[in-house]
Every structure is written in C-alpha cells, then in structure tokens.
Amino acid sequence: MFFIEIVKQAIIEEENRNFTKALNLFNHALTFAKSESTITKLQARKAWCLHYVGNHSEAYKLFQKLLKEHKNHPTSYLLTGFYLIKTGKLKEAKKVLTEGKSKFPNYLELYLTLASLLTDTQRSNEAIDILKEALAREKLVRAKGIEKKDIWAYLGTLYFERSNYNSSIVSLKKSLNLYHEEYFPLFDLLAKCYLKINDPTNAIKYIDLRLAYYSEDPEDYIIKARAHSRLGEHHLASSSLLQAYSLENYLKLNAEDMVDFSYLLQSGFFNALEDVEFEES
C-alpha cells in the first residue's frame, strides 16, 4: 500500500470513529513520511486518535513532544495550539500560539488562530492588535485560501463590535478594494457603520450594492428604509419596508430601528401591516 493510500484509509477510519485502526495506519504512514510538515500533521492526527479513545494524557504528551521535536516548523505550534483550544487549555494555547507567531512571523494561520482565541475569550482589543500586526507583515504565507482582504474584513468586524465605526469603515474599505466588488461579503456591515456615524447617503450606496449582488434579505431593506427615513424620504422608507415585509409576510423591528421610523409610526404606516413584531432591544 502506497503512502497516500495509507493516509486516505487512515482518515476514512478516523471519520468512521475507528480510532485504533486509524492510529495504527497513521503510525504506518509515518514510516514513509519525509517532510517535516507531513510528519507534524500525522503526529497530530495520532494524538487526536488517542484523545478520542479516552487517552487524554498520552494525547497531550504527544503534542508536547511534537513541539519539542519539531520546534523549527510552524505547524507544530499551530496544531498544538488548536488542540489546546479544543480541550479548554486556553491560557496554554495563547502561550503556544504567541511563541509560534514570534518564531514564524510570516505564518498567517498563527495570527488568525490567536486572534480567534482572543476574540472568543472577550479580549477583542488584543485580537485587533494581533490582526494589525499580521497586516504589517509584507510576506505573509497564505492560510488555506485566506488572504489579506479577509483579515481586513475580520478586523472591520471586530472594530464594529467595539463600536469603533470609523476604524471599521476604513478596514472594510481596504478589504473591499482587494475584492472583486461582486464577491465582497460585508456591504451590509459597511452600510450599518455609515448609519452609526449618521451618514445615510453612504449607507444607501452600500446596501444597494449588497442588494445588487446578493439575494434579497429583509434586513437589507430595513437598513435602507432607516437611511431613507434619516434623509426625510419617508415614501422611499415606506417602500423599502414593504419590500422587506413582502419577502416573508412578516416584519421584525428592534428599538434602534424604531428610532428612525418614528414618523412612520406616528403616521399609522405600521397599522396596515398584519404581522409586525417590535423588539425592545
């Protein structure tokens, strides 16, 4: 059996939860592996097999061995960090990923995994710093199809969550400039940013781009309606809300939305719609 066939069979056994068989096959594959990248990946799969059969201590030891014996390859830090995150050892994961990032400053996946960990542990300011550090590197190694445009988009999302809307706009536009326009996924977030800084004209511009390239979504028409309301274009706001309503024969609006729709509320517009829900927050 050739190396590739052994690995494929091992993965099949792993997916079928035959972890002992998979472990033996990964061991067999390791006798043929030559590149350090391949060896680290196979060792990591072995460790996961041990973990899934309940041998957690041996799995942990194998990852520690991986770091020790393959400290000159970035995947050893990445795969160990991922294991530590998945098993709840978050402080240790942060340490390993930070060490890996320092040792391999052009390896993008280390930045992304560390930023994700920091975001998930309510440390988004630190995550923002990590992403900015990554973007400052000129020779980043691409990570499984992830490019700088994706990092700018991620950064824009984090800034939005931190209510830093101007920085979010800057980041999202940098991302947009690196995309083919029709594939940019965050026109709606960009429009929301412009609403947050009270620039309804640009909010309409970007939500219209969203509607041009993507399937219709009620939320997009609500954003557009809010922007028209701020411009005093209440007939256009009404039209957008009716388009949102027609998609699902239902409309859900929150308190922030209703601030912009006070004129329509007073004029009785919503009385004509049968199924409207007003959320308090």
Image (spheres, rainbow, N blue to C red):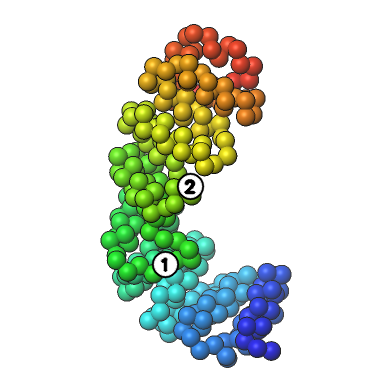
Q: Secondary structure at mark 2?
A: helix
| Residue at image mark 2 | 182
Q: Position of residue 235 (x, y in %)?
A: 48, 16
Mark sitting on residue 142? 1
Chain-order first, disc 2 or disc 1: 1
Q: Position of residue 201 (x, y in %)?
A: 36, 29
Q: Position of residue 158 (x, y in %)?
A: 38, 47
Q: Which image quarter: residue 6? A: bottom right
Rendered view: 227 above or below 232: below
Eye-nearest disc, 2 or 1: 2
- Name the residue rendered at 64%, 16% in the picture: 274
- Name the residue rendered at 54%, 12% in the picture: 269
Q: Is residue 68 or residue 245 the one in the foreground? A: 245
Q: Position of residue 209 (x, y in %)?
A: 46, 38
* Quadrant of the rendering where the N terminus is positioned: bottom right
- Name the residue rendered at 57%, 90% in the picture: 32
Q: Amino acid at mark 1?
A: Arg
Q: CA distance from mark 2 to mark 1?
A: 22 Å
Rendered view: 150 above or below 230: below
Q: Cβ–Cβ below 8 Å for labels 2 and 1? A: no
